[in-house]
Amino acid sequence: MMKIALVMAMFLCGAEASIGINWGRESAQRLVPSQVVDLLLQNGIGRARLFSSQRDIVAAFEGSGINLTVTINRISSVKTKELAAGWVQKNEFHFSRCNVRFVYLGGFPFLTGMATLAPLTEALNTQRLLQDVLIERGFGHVKVIIQHLEAEVSPNVIKPSEFEFHDVIKPYMIQHLQFLRENNAPFPLDIIPMIDVFNNNFDPSFAFPDNASSLVIHDVNGAVYTNAIEWRYDSFMWALEKLNFSDVPIDISVLGWPTDGFSGANASNAEYFYKHAMTWAASNRGTPKKPGHAINVNVHSLADEHKILSSPFMRHFGIYRSNGQPKYKIDLSGQGRDIYPTTVRGIMRMPSRWCAFNGDRSDMDKVKAQLDWACTKSDCTSTFEGASCSSLTLEQNITYAFNMYFQFQFQDEKSCDFEGLGHVVVNDPSTDVCVFPVEVIKGQQVNFLSNNARHAFRPSTPFFCLSILLFLFSYQTL
């Protein structure tokens, strides 16, 4: 009777740190849960986080030995003793047979708390209430946790030793940390190096943990920082220490590099990033503040999620495309081998057919309207400035949009009409740098509650997107 964790698998046993992975399903084409379980086992992944607690998804992990973290997307659904007890009773199968170790309360309440404290108070009360119910029902090994991110600590600070939590949330953070200490639970921290590099105007090379950065940050006690992962991790270690909670372990619940959506988000940079990040995670090398410290890390994420309603790059964190094909080489064991992860077994692609623009420009207002509609109903972020398909011609852009919608609709020929502007073709319109995808056949597409709040902390304004295109990444890693 154990439970998952995106942040921590072996912590409870005092063993070495482990590498896990996150799996979200905000996509038109979703990998079947049984295929995902097989994929994780093939790649030696013993820990995974699911962004839901949907029973048929969790049930696929029964007998796999994979430790799971499940997510409650709406805190209000368990905010009373009665609701929490009902949720636990409904999910007892998870706790007794599917190795569930952690329950995430969705969203980022401490970020919300900097503007209004009511949701934060509700989240902390619900965390303790749900934990008490789990203990009462004999599932005390399952820990209720909340994610944290960079915005909770001081902005415009360079040295990790100078970081601390924002004053407005400090009293609530102390309450939260006391709960984690009492329940032997970790502090899950999201780290996206490209965001730290952008927000702090650092040299782009600082985002890569290869110890080759042109930026070197010196801190107290001789600590030296050459990459954003160790820098951000230690900034939170200092913040915890200043509240007298240095004994609460920090796990990296999100660590990732996108492959599209802005300049520099590509497979080559992702491969280079993970080549060094995974070996660091498996080395138990620790950080300058705490050398030799084992840190649990979760890769974000398993597959692309084209329906995320946030910044374009948030849709492209998958190490796999939605059709189960790996995008680049990554050794998830942390041994540094130059290998591709195992391909998903049993994937069946739809026929090699694409929806293309027929070239009719007689009514460009109609063309533009259909282009915009197709992008609204699918995903055109790969055609944004600086992304992999940003060099397409106008006709190619229209074809890309039409085809994405066509694939989202599982190649229903009616979806390729676009008021007479589209037609189905069998010749691949892809270019040398831009893939016009053919997606997988329709499998398990049961909807569950979407949790776009899980991405709300990431910048999503046009200013951010344009600025990051200009700033990141003239740096070439390979």
Image (spheres, helix red, strand yellow):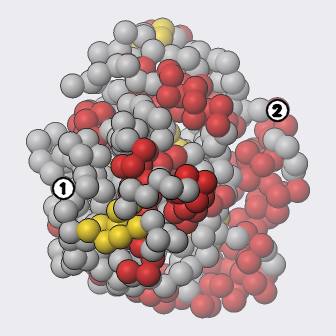
Q: Which residue appears at 37% of the width and 41% of the height?
A: 393
> Image point 45% across, 24% down: which residue?
472
In the picture as drawn, the residue positioned furthest to the front comes out as 362
Which residue was labeled with disc 1?
A: 341
Instruction: Name the amino acid type tagged 2.
Output: Asp
Real-space CA distance between mark 1 and mark 2, rounded to the nearest whole angstrom: 44 Å
Give me the residue at 61% from left, 54% from top.
365
Q: Quadrant of residue 273?
A: top left
- Indicate which disc residue 167 carries: 2
Q: Is residue 61 above or below residue 408?
A: below
Q: Nearer the viewer, residue 223 or 421?
A: 421
Comparing 217 with 427, the one in front is: 427
Q: Does residue 270 sit above or below 104 in this rendering?
A: above
Where, quadrant-wise, is the C terminus in this rendering? top left
SS of the residue under disc 1: loop
Callout 1: 10 Å neighbours few (<14), some, many (20+)? Answer: many
Disc 2 residue crowd, few under 14, some 14–19, many 20+, Cα 10 Å:
few
Task: Tell whether 474 sits left or right of 53.
Answer: left
Please report whichever mark, 1 or 2, sits nearer to the chain's N-terminal start. 2
